[in-house]
Every structure is written in C-alpha cells, then in structure tokens.
C-alpha cells in the first residue's frame, strides 16, 4: 500500500516538474523544477529498492549537475529573454506524442518475464562486488575515469580565456 | 492494485517524451541540455525497473544506470562549457542563431 501511494506521488511530481521545465518561460524557475524532477527520480529508485543509486542520484544530479546548470544560467544572462518555443513546436509535439503512444502500446502488449524473487534489502555491497570483480565490469570501471579526465581537460580548454 | 513493471516503464516513456519535446522545440541551449538530462533520467528509471523486476539479484541494470549517470555528468560539463564558450563569442545561446557550421 505504501508503495502504491509513494509511486503515484513521485510519478505525479516527476511529470509535473518535467512539464514545468519544458513549458515555463523563466529559465531559472525551470532549473529549480529540474531539481524537483531529479528528487522524484531518486524517490522512484528508493521504491525500486536501489538505495545506492538513489544516493548517487542525489549526489551527482542534485549536487553537481543542477549547480552547473544554474551557474551556466547565471553566466549567460538569458533569463530575461526566457525560453520561447521555436517554429517546430507543433511538429515536435506530434513527434513526442507519437513516440509516447508507440512505446506505451509496445510496453502494454508485451508479456514481461517477471520473477517472484524479492530484491535484496541492500544493494551497495552487491554492486561493489559486481563492479570490481574480475568477471564483472572492471574494464568499464577503468574506462570511466578516462572519460572523466578527458571531460575535465576539455571543459578547461573550452572555457579558457584565449585573449591573454 | 499493485505497482508492476509496466507502471514504471510507462512513467519512463512519458518522461522521455517530455524530454524529447523539450529538446526539439526550444530556443535556449541550456533548456535543451536540461531536456536531455530529463531523457537520461527516464532511461535510468527504465533500467532500474527492469533490474528490480526481471533479475533482482543480478543488479546489471543498476550497474548500467551508474555508468549512464557518470556519462551524463561528463556530457553536462562539456555541453555547458561549449555553451559558455559560444556565449562569449556570439553573445547569444539561441540554438537557432548558432549556425556557424550551417552549409
């Protein structure tokens, strides 16, 4: 029962916040609503008993990505001109609606192979074993730091003042 | 009623469509980037839902969601750096006016 109530509360909050991000004219308010959307997604992760992912969602998305986006909004001073829609508004709406209908139709007409096994109560140690064991995901875990290093270097080079 | 896999997948599909609309129909480059973040969150919901309902003990979907988060963070950092760099040169971040590479 608690899961049902939680799901509907989080689902309505996420979709309302996401619609606000897309439809609001004020860019800063859209960024604040994006934080609400990320919080709702973290709640959905908790409902799916993915506690480590919920913590990472809050740390990475709300702690880092939202701050970056708000900083960029402050730096570019485009809050006054707002976020109007372009001339593709109607075609974009049609494409998104068609995509949504197609995917929902496919989801509801597929018989998913759901197991009755209950999910583990805590996932952190299992995730650690999965990530760092030899037959697990150790190679991607080693590639991700390379990606992050390239990102740091790229961001520094891109925003460096070249006039000096 | 109980909440099943379909509920989470439909939520993910609706969220992805909202992000798709925002990414296609907006002028402001930062709003487009925010829409892309919404789409990535929708994909994460679907991955974790599959992981929880189909293979609860294997946790493969959660590992994929972790990698998606890391790549999303990298993508946002580089994207915002590009946007700030363009703003310095052209004084605008209107995606319709950034047409340096238009043929």
Image (spheres, coloured by chain):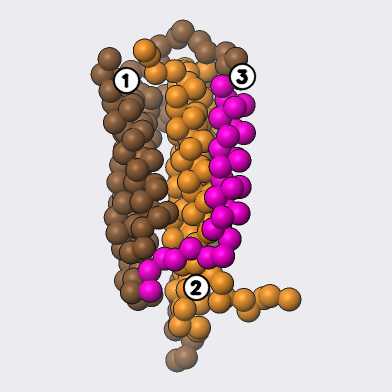
Chain colours: A brown, B orange
User: Do labels 2 and 1 touch, CB within 8 Å?
Assistant: no
- Quadrant in which the C terminus of chain A appears: bottom left
Q: How far across and down, in percent of the image, does residue B7 sit?
A: 45, 24
Q: Name the disc covering residue A4, or none.
A: 1
User: Magenta span has A84?
Assistant: yes
Residue ranking furthest to the right = B103
Which residue appears at 73% of the width and 76% of the height? B103
Q: To which residue does mark 2 refer?
A: B94
Marker count (numbered): 3
Q: Is the same chain shared between marks 1 and 3? A: yes
Q: Looking at the picture, tell me which residue is in the foreground, B102 or A123.
A: B102
Q: Is residue A101 visible?
A: yes
Q: Is residue A155 visible?
A: no
Which chain's residue wears label 2? B
Which chain's residue wears label 1? A
Q: How far across and down, in percent of the image, does residue A54 sit?
A: 34, 35
Q: To which residue does mark 3 refer?
A: A110
User: Do labels 1 and 3 touch, CB within 8 Å?
Assistant: no
Q: Quadrant of residue B84?
A: bottom left
> What stretch of residues is rendered in magenta?
A81-108
User: Magenta span has B22?
Assistant: no
Which residue appears at 39% of the width and 18% of the height? B3
Distance in Å between CA atoms under marks 3 and 2: 41 Å
Q: Looking at the picture, tell me which residue is in the foreground, A99 or A47.
A: A99
Q: Quadrant of residue B41?
A: top left
Distance in Å between CA atoms under marks 1 and 3: 22 Å
SS type, badge 2: loop
Q: How far across and down, in percent of the image, does residue B9 sit?
A: 50, 28
């Amino acid at each position: 029962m608690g899961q049902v109530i939680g799901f509907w509360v989080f689902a309505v909050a996420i979709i309302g916040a996401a619609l606000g991000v897309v439809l609001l004219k004020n860019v800063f308010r859209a960024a604040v609503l994006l934080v609400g959307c990320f919080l709702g997604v973290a709640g959905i992760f908790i409902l799916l008993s993915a506690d480590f992912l919920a913590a990472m969602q809050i740390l990475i998305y709300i702690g880092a990505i939202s701050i970056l986006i708000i900083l960029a909004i402050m730096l570019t001073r485009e809050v006054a001109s707002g976020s109007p829609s372009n001339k593709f508004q109607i075609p974009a709406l049609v494409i998104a609606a068609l995509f949504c209908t197609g995917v929902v139709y496919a989801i509801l007409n597929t018989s998913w192979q759901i197991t009755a096994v209950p999910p583990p109560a805590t996932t952190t140690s299992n995730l650690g074993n999965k990530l760092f064991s030899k037959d697990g995901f150790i190679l991607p875990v080693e590639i991700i730091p390379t990606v992050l290093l390239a990102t740091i270097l790229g961001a520094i080079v891109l925003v460096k003042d070249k006039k000096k | 009623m109980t909440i099943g896999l379909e509920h989470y997948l439909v939520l993910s599909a609706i969220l992805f469509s909202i992000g798709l609309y925002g990414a296609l129909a907006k002028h402001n480059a930062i709003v487009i980037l925010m829409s892309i973040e919404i789409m990535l969150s929708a994909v994460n919901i679907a991955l974790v839902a599959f992981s929880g309902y189909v293979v609860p003990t294997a946790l493969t979907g959660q590992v994929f969601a972790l990698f998606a988060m890391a790549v999303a963070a990298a993508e946002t950092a580089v994207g915002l750096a590009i946007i700030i760099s363009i703003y310095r040169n052209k004084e605008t971040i209107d995606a319709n006016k950034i047409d340096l590479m238009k043929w």
